[in-house]
Amino acid sequence: MCGIVGCIGNRSVTPIIVESLKRLEYRGYDSAGIATLNGAEIDITKTEGKIADLENILSLTNTACVGIGHTRWATHGIPSSTNAHPHADCSGSFAVVHNGIIENFQALKDELTSKGHIFSSETDTEVLAHLCEDCYNGDLESAVREALLRVEGSYAIAVISDNEPDVIVAARKDSPLIVGLGDGENFLASDIPAIRKYTNKVMYINDGEIVRLTRDNVTVSTLQGVNVERLVTIVDGSVQDAERGGYEHFMLKEIHEQPKALRDTMEDRLCELEGSIDFKELRPFEDEIKNIEGITIIACGTSYHAGILGKYALEDLLRIPVKVEYSSEFRYNNFLSGNRSLAICISQSGETADTLAAMNEAKAQGYLTLAITNVVGSTITRKADEILLTKSGMEIGVAATKTFTAQILTLYMLGIYVARLKKLIDVETSRHIITSMKSVPGLIESLLDNISDIEKASSRICEADCCYFIGRGLSYPIALEGALKMKEISYIKAEGFPAGELKHGPLALITAGTPVIAIVPKGKTYYKTLGNIKEVKARNAFVIAIANASDDEIVKYVDSVIKIPDIDELFSPMLAAVVLQLLAYYAAKDIGAEIDQPRNLAKSVTVE
Ligand code: F6R
């Protein structure tokens, strides 16, 4: 949450910072600001609202060549221009942008106030500006270092000072920070896409490190003052990834990118003939993986829903217990030793604070940790024992779509991989699964070619003030995900239930006309779910079924049917997920909601 950027060069930095902030806006968008330094003094412009609002009030004649910027997702203090970053000290000599939470800010604030510092915002961040002022003794880097040694919590910060007009100092602990290297100019940002337009050369900054940027030089050192040699990484990924490419919203573009994301995630990994999965990256761990006796999947939100599907598939293939835990719960639970256990930590961003902390806990308990993530170089990739990348390309819409189906695919591939290692399935069986797996992208393409039933169903849902999603077995996590997508972008109240649980309480919510979306592909639980559909129909619910193309029976029991192509039961959740993403998308569009940036949410939750 929150995005920070900085730039020091020989040209006006204002347009660069604005452009970079736009690419970070998915991290938070309730207020934004920028501080520039023109050699003599700091100029701060900030406002409540989005980057576009900031852009409207920025001076076009600002020629300053040094600056920092921020897009905020409020934690301490309401969204307002006063609480927006950058924050300054009493004299206006220091400006700070910050992503994270300073946990001991109140104690520091009290101390600084008693020394005569005057605070103007309700934020935790402002203490950093006053601390820098307090610690400054002729060297900005030393002042930042000294200030940070007094701070508890998480941060990625950037600081400028009119005392040293040709320097930006930045630092990180538990919040992401990268540096971009240009020609006579250097950049910093919360993530690579923010500055990808300006350079493809990056340095990853680690926890506990401070970085000093001038136009021509970047130095990295630890908080304790030990110099660090940092390699430069050349990144790929095109600038176009961050464009809408003719689609009205990033979310719609990303839904349509799913066939490619899945093909890329499978590429070079599926060996159909041998009936095996080639995860080269896991080879060094084969012996350990072979001996795994239990698995815990740890994730938040949509990644958690992928985790539930992973549990069902992994238990089926591996015949060992698989638990799924919310990261925020796992990290505070009294869990058992992770001896001979694998912790699979799923995070598309690789930066979710709760998942990172839970992974650290799991490691400390002796689990072997495996991260599934979409972001190369993200914090999780540098902390996990093993990494499996989904190759979905950059996801900008706040609602996860293509990364979700790629996570499911990766968990399935992992299941086959481990099952073959443990010799639990034969070549024939895994070959059969792989053949179906390979057909998924093409089937999603055909589904995306005909969406009129989905649009119709979404307008029906928009007429109601709530809706419910039901499913059993593999369709249950998809019901949860369908409800999450619906509520997060359309703001329609939506809940997902295991269909069999309806009669244990939720049935009381059903009244005449209530939309119930039943995910009911052919498979083990088909007739059981049909029974649950009858239960809600008996209460006059309006039932929309997501069913297989060859299912001619379902139409007798429901009000509306959205068909998905026929495929092995294991893979129908991936097809149903695409339908539910579109259902939420069109409902949000009907309502006129801000689809790519839903209220109160941010894409990457980097605070606890
Ligand atoms: C919902 C959504 C969130 C994320 C959750 C975890 O559409 O995107 O629920 O899934 O914040 O994020 P990652 O996967 O980045 O750890």
Image (cartoon, helix red, strand yellow):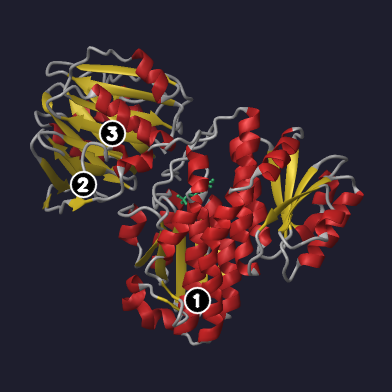
Circle 3 SS class: strand
Q: Which of the labelled discs sits on residue 377, or is there none?
A: none
At label 1, the amino acid type is Ile
Residue 319 placement, left or right of 521: left
Decide: few, some or many residues near mark 2? Use Cα within 10 Å; few <14, some 14-19, many ≥20.
Answer: many
Compare marks 2 and 3 and give the one earlier in the sequence: 3
The picture places residue 348, in percent across and down from the top left corner, at 44, 53
Mark number displayed over residue 202: 2
Instruction: Say which of marks 2 and 3 sits in front.
Output: 2
Task: Name the residue nearer the viewer: 117 or 458.
Answer: 458
Depth check: give the residue in front, 469 or 430.
430
Circle on res. 416: 1
Q: CA distance from mark 2 to mark 3?
A: 14 Å
Q: What distance separates the C-alpha of mark 1 from that of mark 3?
A: 42 Å
- Residue for badge 3: 5
Q: Which SS class for mark 2? A: strand
Q: Residue at x 56, y 82 (%)?
A: 429
Q: Foreground: 114 or 186?
A: 186
Using the image, determine if residue 18 lies above or below residue 241: above
Q: Residue at x 61, y 68 (%)?
A: 570
Q: In the figure, is residue 515 to the left or right of 587?
A: right
Residue 363, visible in the rendered structure: yes
If the image is split into quadrants, where does the N terminus sit? top left
Mark positioned earlier in the residue sequence (1 or 3): 3
Using a 10 Å C-alpha cutoff, classify the residue at mark 1 as few (fewer than 14 neighbours), some (14 to 19) or many (20 or more). many
Residue type marked 3: Val
Q: Is residue 555 above or below residue 44?
A: below
